[in-house]
Image (cartoon, rainbow, N blue to C red):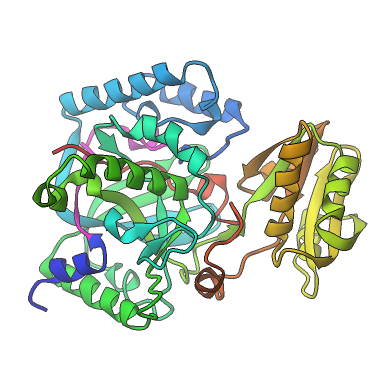
Amino acid sequence: MKNPVESMAKLALHPADILIPKKGINLRKWATVACDQYTSNKSYWERVSNYVGNAYSTLALTFPEVYLEDEDSAQRIERINKAMEQYVKDGIFDTYHNCFMLVRRDTPRSTRWGLVGCLDLEAYDFSPDSTSLIRATEGTIVSRIPPRKAIREHALLELPHIMVLIDDGEKSLIEPLKAGHRLVYDTDLMENGGHVSGYLVDSEEDFTHIAEALQGLYDKLDPDNPLLFAMGDGNHSLATAKSCWEDIRNRLSPEEALHHPARYALVEIENIHDEGLEFEPIHRVFFNLSRKEFDALLTKQCRSFSVAKVTGSAAGFLKQINEPGAQRFGLSEAGEGLLVYTLSEPKASLAAGSIQSVIDLMLETTNGKVDYIHGVDETLRLGNQTGNLGLVLPDVSKQTFFSAIIKDRALPRKTFSMGEANEKRYYLEARSLKD
């Protein structure tokens, strides 16, 4: 292959100039979990802040979404931008030019691998009828983009929590890279996040391998609907990057637009077939909604439903939710314990779709509110608090995931997640967004 970088670029993948904190910086304090985690748990983020103290940390460079509705949002964004400038001025980063970073993540439950690099936002379209190489897997809520744009549009750096999936059943792209690369970083992660290591991928041989494997994956796709990269985590962050890029592109000449840093987004690419990738549903917690009100809203989404109380372990509860043959989900309520709902003739094909219709009606007709929760334990904890309802959804199939996206265009909002909250991506690598 004459020019593997050009070959990759035709399929929207690019190496990047990746910034890693210099040796001597405490990476355990540096790396914090994705900002869209623990969104109903301020005590988590307060604990992180106390642990980090005044150390260099991505906590100062990101906006935990638990604080999005606070009155000091504008001041927080200003502090983030100033911290980015100060960190760059302090010279805390080493730059690894024109490379990818191979990432090994050991979580309390498993080990997974990913490849950090840039995706071309020109090849990404989050509209529901998209047939682009890179696309959303769930409906994108356009109203969620503006507050995120306020954070990104003046940012000096980007730090990725975006995880993008490839459908590589033969394990041809990422897995062969596992051996023989230089270790760049290696650290435990705070708050039971496990361990993460990063290896430099920058040789011509590596690039040729990546380009050939990527082309092999593309050649198997329908040319009229070539879904190569499917959003795993961070859909609204990538949509925000796309929106920011469109604003910037309008001010550039065609030549300037070809290589502007904002045209690209730094992401971690993961193989959906990696055994260590925990592919799980995202659950829901309702606030200020009684079960009687919930049941009345659910009645409109199916012919009928039954409710069974579960005694015993949470494992048995989850097993019942995932029994084949009917659409089911679980519910946790203070004083009532664990319940399994079974729907007859539901209007939606997935439990997530039925619950989303309930959410839509709830927001229109009641004072109820909803949050989307990663992890069964956190959902049950919140559901057991008076006035809340914790909704536990059934598993999502890896095997049919890509075909479902191609067929249905998009899943209901927040249908799935890759792992529980402490297993999500931690901010570690960075990239400059400025020329």
- The picture quadrant where one finds residue 154 is top left
Most foreground residue, 256 or 212:
256
User: Is residue 33 left or right of 341 when viewed as pictured?
Assistant: left
Residue 380, above or below 209: above
Residue 156, above or below 374: above
Q: What residue span does the magenta drawing correspond to? A: 14-32
Residue 198 location in percent, x, y?
A: 29, 53
Q: Is residue 24 magenta?
A: yes
- The picture quadrant where one finds residue 433 is top left
Count of number-bearing discs: 0
- The picture quadrant where one finds residue 326 is bottom right
Residue 146, above or below 55: below
Residue at point 52% right, 25% down?
A: 67
Residue 266 location in percent, x, y?
A: 29, 50
Query: Which image quarter holds the N terminus?
Result: bottom left
Query: Which image quarter holds the C terminus?
Result: top left
Most foreground residue, 41 or 252:
252
Residue at point 33% right, 37% down?
A: 27
Kindly tell me whether residue 97 is visible in this rendering.
Answer: no
Residue at point 88% right, 47% down?
A: 296
User: Is residue 129 left or right of 98 when viewed as pictured?
Assistant: right
Q: Is residue 46 magenta?
A: no
User: Is residue 316 left or right of 416 when viewed as pictured?
Assistant: right
Residue at point 56% right, 75% down?
A: 400
Residue 305 location in percent, x, y?
A: 89, 60
